[in-house]
Image: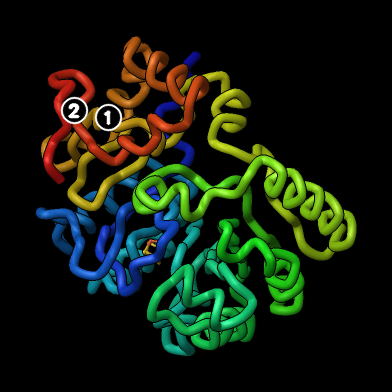
Amino acid sequence: MSLNLAAPSFIAWQLTRDCNLACLHCCTDSAPGRPFPNELTRQESLSIAEQIVKAQVPYVLLAGGEPLIVPHFFELAQFLGHGGVYLKVETNGQIFGEKEAEKLSHLPIRSLQISIDGATQAVYSKMRPGAFLEKTLFACRTARKFNLPLEITFAPTKINIFEAEAVIDLAASLGAFRLNTGHLMRLGTAAKLWEKLNLSPEDYKKFYNLLEMKEKEFSGKMEILFRPFSIQEDLMAKKISSPGTILILPDGRVRVSGFLPYTCADLRQETLIQAWEKCQKAYQNPKISSGFEEILKDDFVLAGANQLRPLETSDLPAMV
Ligand code: SF4
C-alpha cells in the first residue's frame, strides 16, 4: 500500500560516510577516510535543500558518518531550518561545543541525537575506539545549556550491556527527553563483527525487561523508545508498505530502504519529486517485498544491505 503523498513527510539525509570515529557497531560502514567516492558538493547539497523547502517537506534528519565534519553542514541546516523544515541531527558528540550548540539553537531542532554506548570511559572506548566519553557528556550538557532537545541512543552489545542501566540513568540526569534503543542492527560494521557483539536471546530478554522497568521509573520525565524492538518487528509493524520517506545517500542516490541494498533514483539526474515518485513505485517491485520477506526469515541477509545497486537495472553489487 502506498501513502500517495505529493512529497515525502520525512527525509533521512546521510550527508557523508566519513567519520571521526570507527565504531564497532556502526550500521553505515562509516570510518575516518571512508566517504563515498563522489559525495555531493556544497552547491549540489544546497540545490537539494532548496527543493526540500519548496516541496514543504516538514522534517529532515541530517546524519552521517559524522555530519559535523561536512564543511557545509551548518549552511545546509540553516537553509533548511530558516525554510521552515524541522530538523533532527545525529552526532557522536566528539566535536560539539558551545559554537555548534549556539548555531543550532536558532533553528527548529526537534532532536539532537547523541550516542552514549557506555557509562565508563573503559567500556565507551571499547565500542568507539579513540573516543572520549567526557567529550560526549560535555556535548550533551552544552546542548541542554542551549535548550536543545537532547535524545540519547544506546546500542546494546556483549561489550556494554552491563552498563545499560547506568546509561539510561545518565541520559535522564543529562536532561534527555528520550532514550532510543533496541536490538542491535545487523548492518555495516556491526554485521561484520556480529558474533563478537550480538547478545544471546536470554540477554536480550533481560535487556527488554530492564527497559520496561525503566520505562515505568521515568514515566512522564524521559521517554524510553524501544518498540518496535528489532528491524524484523519494525517491518512487521509497517506491513512492508511505502513509508512516506526518502533516504538520500552522500552521493545523491536515493535508497529504497535502509534495510535493502537497492537505490531507485539519483538526485544528480532527477528532481526530488521525481525521485519521490520513483521511491513510491519501487515498493511495487517484487524484489522489495521478497527482500523484506528474506529479512523476516533470517536477519543474516542484512549483512549485505550496504552493497548498493540500482533496483531496476542490476542484481550485481556495485562497488562503493
Ligand atoms: S556509529 Fe556513528 S560515530 Fe560511530 S563510526 Fe558510525 S557514524 Fe561514526
Tell me the tag on residue 74. Answer: none
- Name above or below for residue 320 compared with residue 158: above
x and y percentages locating residue 295 in the rendered image: 46, 25
Picture quarter with ligand 1 = bottom left
x%, y% of residue 27? Answer: 40, 51
Residue sitting nearer the eye, 171 or 293: 293
Q: Which residue is mark 2?
A: 310
Q: Between disc 1 and disc 2, whose residue precedes?
A: 1
Q: Provide the secondary structure element on which disc 2 rests.
A: strand
* Residue 187 visible here: yes
Q: Residue at x 52, y 77 (%)?
A: 105
Res 7 seen here? no
Q: Position of residue 239 (x, y in %)?
A: 57, 19
Q: Nearer the viewer, residue 47 or 151?
A: 151
Q: Is mark 2 within 8 Å of ligand 1?
A: no
Residues at marks 1 and 2 touching, judged by CB atoms closer than 8 Å? yes
Residue 262's label in the rendered image is: 1
Residue type, mark 2 in image:
Pro
